[in-house]
Image (cartoon, rainbow, N blue to C red):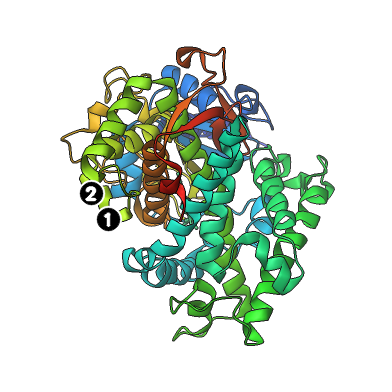
Amino acid sequence: MEFKVVDFWLLVVGVVSLILYLMWFILNLKKSLPPGPPNWPIVGSLFYLSKCSHVALANLAKKYGPIMYLRLGFVDHIIVSNSEMTMEFFKVHDAEFASRPKLLIGKYLGLDWSTIAFSNGYHTRLLRKIATTELLTIARINSFEPRRQEELGCMVEKIVEHNQGRKLVNMRQIFHELITNNICRMLFGTRCETTKEFTGTDFDEFFNSVSKLIGLVGEFNLSDFIPFLKPFDLQGLEKKMKPAKDKMEHYVESILKKYKEGNKMVDNSNVKDFVEILLNLHEKLDDATIKSIMVDMLAGGGDTTTTALEWALAEIIHNPEIMNRAQEELDRVVGTNRRVHESDLPNLPYLDSIVKETFRLHPPSPLTTGHVNVKDAQVLHYKIPANTIVFINIWAINRDPKAWKKPLEFIPDRFLNTNISLSGSNYNLLPFGSGRRRCPGMDLAQHMVHCALATLIQAFDWSPPVGVKPQDMNMMEGHKGVFLVKADPLIVIAKPRRPLEFYKH
Ligand code: HEM
């Protein structure tokens, strides 16, 4: 066939139109995404993030705005850094962004993506329903108050012993024991270390495995962002995760086995443990599901609550006038003859303000867990492609100078006589997230933190080690995986405020 001049020009016009169309398409696509730093081929914006990611992201947001697009490897990410944009995602578009990304850590810490925190769809809805209507209700939490009081009694005795030996007290260690024992006693009736007598498996080994996995959550796993690297395990992360998962799973399995053999691990009380409740639910659960819920409670509640308590006590030692006011409130409301009870808490507004201010300034989880949209979504005038991972920068929002006066200072008074709660309904304060994937352990965590802090403030005068002035204490932030911990463990002096009989339980 003859190639005519007309055909040539038709071809040129066709090619030019195609190029123009592609340019228009790419420009438009870019235009409809939120602003963000430049993306390099393959690695995207990975270079812009340091290890301390909530701080790096908050700094980037100062340049690119409260809704920011980052391409990390081949994966689209949105970072949200103010309350208005958070409302868009957690209120207006909550259902669209209620899935979790399928990251490698979910295979190991999330027991093959089956725990609440790492799963999706019907399974998550079922587990969340069980957690919020059967296990973590206010009535159920209250039914465990005697066990929590006993644990607080043990904590106080331990601190007094340290004091008699004139030793400094490592409060991180004390809080770790308090919180893990509280959770173990709710799950299976007994203290963590006692499970070994019943099952032969060691709680410390379990907890070290959880800690190892939590530590690895904070590592950038390249294959999560560059999928063709998946088969290679270039960073050796799977090699580290697998044995930790095996130990973690073995521990919960051995406890479940005991229950199924008809051996409840304790106790003469008629309060039902979580494992007992789960085994007797109307909708029969398989063992894998029960194990997942056990891991959710033990892994989700331990480090977060311990960290919050450590920050709260550190702040009142750092600010002695706040400690004096809190002690004055406790002495006035509770008196000086008995230990504070959970029923006193509603009458302690200043203590409540200290807890809220702690969660504002030091959210243990500075970013939410990633949320994902399974379909394309339109948020304001932005088009968000399907499978974008959205993080809310809780830390940045809780310190937003537009929302909070003197945001970097610890000022509990800002909460007095307000109805601001920690529940996620105020989008300027989100330590537990908000919406469909909000933390289901929120009420339990607050119970544990309020009551422990009240007991510590009532029972002891606190000070930093000799030679360190309160204002010179190290209040720097550090990291444990994705959690925002105090850089140094809180090591302090505790001086009893009451006669010794007061501390016996
Ligand atoms: C001070 C203590 C705690 C803090 C600050 C905290 C914070 C959070 C945050 C920020 C999230 C993610 C929310 C989101 O992605 O939107 C979360 C999820 C979760 N938390 Fe907590 N949490 C705490 C205690 C607990 C406790 C005590 C438990 C259980 C006993 C727990 C179990 C969970 C679970 C299972 C999830 C996953 C929810 C889901 O994916 O649907 N947390 N928590």
Quarter of the rendering containing residue 292: bottom right
Q: Which one is nearer the viewer's eye here, 247 or 151?
A: 151
Secondary element type, mark 1: helix
Instruction: State the image coordinates of residue 210 (x, y, percent, origin top left).
Output: 67, 52
Q: Which one is nearer the viewer's eye here, 304 or 234?
A: 304
- Residue located 35% across and 23% down the image: 410
The answer to whether one can see residue 438 in this image is no
Q: Which one is nearer the viewer's eye here, 450 or 256?
A: 450
Q: Are marks 2 and 1 in contact (CB under 8 Å)?
A: yes
Q: Where does the N terminus fall, quadrant-wise?
A: top right
Amino acid type indicated by mark 2 = Pro
Pointer 2: what residue?
Answer: 346
Amino acid type indicated by mark 1 = Ser
Inter-mark Cα distance, 2 to 1? 7 Å
* Residue 321 versus residue 369 in the image, above or below: above
Pointer 1: what residue?
Answer: 343
Count residues near mark 2 (Cα–Cα under 10 Å), then give few for <14, some for 14-19, many for 20+: few
- Residue located 59% across and 54% down the image: 299
The nearer-to-camera label among 2 and 1 is: 1
Instruction: State the image coordinates of residue 488 (x, y, percent, origin top left).
Output: 61, 26
Point out which mark residue 155 bears: none
- Residue located 53% across and 27% down the image: 493
- Horizontally, residue 415 falls left or right of residue 110, namely left
Secondary element type, mark 2: helix
- Horizontally, residue 435 falls left or right of residue 150, namely left
